[in-house]
Image (cartoon, rainbow, N blue to C red):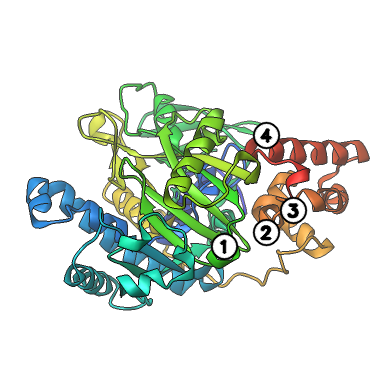
Amino acid sequence: MQDSEDGRYDCVVIGGGIIAAAAGQHLAAAGYRTLLAERDDYGSGTSSRTSRLQHCGLGYLSAAGGSLAGFLAHPLKALECLDLMRRSMRGRAEFVETSPERVRPVTFLVPLTRENAIPRWKAHAASRLMRASDGGRVPLDLRVLTAEEARALPALEGLAGLGAIRGAISFTEYQYVWPERIVVDTIMKARAIGLEALNHTPVTAIRRESDGWIVSLETPGGQRQVRTRAVVNCAGVWVDEVTAMTGSSQVRRNAGEKGTNIVLRLPPHMRGFGIETVTDSGAPFYLIPWGDLHYVGPWNSPSDGRPEGFRASEEEIAAILMQLGRMFPELPLDRDQVLYSWAGARPRSLSPEGSGPSAAVREHDLTSAGLPNVFTFTGGLLMTHREAGRRLTRAVRRRIEPSGAPRALDPTTPLTPDMSVVTERSVEHAVRQEQARTLEDILRRRLSVGWEADLGTAMAETAAKIAGPYLGWSEADAAAQVKHFIDTTERDFGFTARTC
Ligand SMILES: Cc1cc2nc3c(=O)[nH]c(=O)nc-3n(C[C@H](O)[C@H](O)[C@H](O)COP(=O)(O)OP(=O)(O)OC[C@H]3O[C@@H](n4cnc5c(N)ncnc54)[C@H](O)[C@@H]3O)c2cc1C
């Protein structure tokens, strides 16, 4: 992409996660001259640490009150949850239709135990409400099973309280095969319609100047300052840190929340099925198939985005194992069976009282907080990222007009080579066309190899050898890249080669 010749932009988008990517794509398509700057690599923050579900939003319905009395007791919260369900169903339909190659359907089961049993008519009403939300565009396949049918399901064998089960709900969820790639795809599409995107480029300062802002960037080539009419802060769990660069540390919108998942091999009869329940404290808890394995979680705790928020602690791993053991008391579960783990810090919206996280997923125009034409997004989710891009673009348009003409939102991009294998073509493409700068950029976010059972460690040397000439690495540089890749894999995923 070409740099803006005069260093002036309509919008600077800060961050390179899924929300920044969607904002960059929608702003560029609307005709805004836009620069996106990500301090690390695209999709390397929370967007790489999700539970990988394009949720249909069924969980929001139970949070919407569960009963008429519950609904009437907290009507605003209930309406917000209904709205989130509707947005989830629409986001699901939109994404499954535009990027079918990036998702796969998974059958999920919700066991209806004595504690969470709901009458059949309510489950059918929920199904109708959900189907109406997306016009039946993508199948939900929601079925309400009797107690007898539930007891006969192999995946529920050994479930605590199976004898007294009231039934089960079965439905289709979609799983992101590879969320990091969705971020990269979105940014590459946006570059094709004029977005200037820079990775490995932290924003270090934001200063007000006459009717706009000056944003300082630390590019790999040195310091650069750009002028912009609007700042679109999509820095995820770090949004408040970035907003504070304007000098206004009073503006807080985010309440981070850490989530941890563990990966293990469950018995063959559970293979391929997802199970959705809640923890003792009422938080969602999933068993999600991942090839022959399952990942289980999330386990949640507060986080401010410090590096520890991106590594599972032993206490969190133990808590997940204990929860799983309560569900399936006969499963032989001990620490050695955890193959690896991952954690991430969710950017949650701060509740209006400022006391903790809320379920809101929304943009904020900070003009009224004394920061003209500064926008942020909180609570952003992968599953509704295109809507986030639209909402931010609408918010910007209420303040400034684009300087260019609109472009196609989803342009046809040139065919990519097979990015599921390490070859000369895939690595060259990652470096030359998709801005990969490190071995981790290549293996984890451009190629799918980094999410195979060995987390990409087996192919690290081969990929580094191929990438070396394209990135100007000496043999020593390539060896250092391999060492760094293996060290960070072991540290961040609690993985050792012996476990693969
Ligand atoms: C355990 C867990 C499970 C989840 N499961 C799901 C799920 O199943 N489905 C779903 O839809 N969502 C899920 N989520 C939520 C989802 O992952 C996040 O909400 C979403 O990825 C947030 O994207 P983002 O772009 O806001 O943040 P990020 O991906 O974190 O992006 C923010 C970016 O800003 C960059 N940045 C920060 N400061 C600067 C700076 N000064 N200069 C430049 N760049 C900067 C960071 O490097 C980072 O890359 C889950 C989250 C967690 C933690």
Q: Of marks 3 and 2, which one's residue comes earlier in the chain?
A: 3
Residue 10 can be seen, yes or no: no
Query: Which quarter of the picture shows residue 416?
Result: bottom right
Vertical position of residue 11 compared to residue 207: above or below: below
What residue is shown at x 60% (from left), y 65% (from top)?
268
Secondary structure beneath dot 1 equals: loop
Q: Distance between the Cα atoms at labels 1 and 4?
A: 23 Å
Q: Quadrant of the N terminus?
A: bottom right
Which badge, 4 or 2, is on the more N-terminal residue? Answer: 2
* Earlier residue among tags 1 and 4: 1
Left or right: residue 45 compared with residue 444: left
* Image location (x, y in percent) of residue 36: 52, 45
Sequence-wise, which precedes: disc 1 or disc 2?
1
Looking at the rendered image, the disc whose residue lies closer to the viewer, 3 or 4, is 4
Task: Measure the C-alpha gap from mark 3 to mark 4.
Answer: 25 Å
Q: Circle 4 sits on which residue?
A: 491
Q: Which residue is mark 2?
A: 448
Residue under numbered circle 3: 431
Going by the numbered disc 2, the residue's amino acid type is Ser
Q: Residues within 10 Å of mark 3 (few under 14, many from 20)?
A: some
Amino acid of disc 3:
Val
Tell me which numbered mark, 1 or 3, is placed earlier along the sequence: 1
Circle nearer the viewer, 1 or 3: 1
Residue position marked by numbered label 1 in the rendering: 177
Quarter residue 26 falls in: bottom left
How many numbered discs sit on the rendered protein? 4
Q: Is label 2 within 8 A of ligand 1 (CB to nearest ligand atom)?
A: no
Measured as percent of width and height from the top left, residue 291 is found at 62, 63
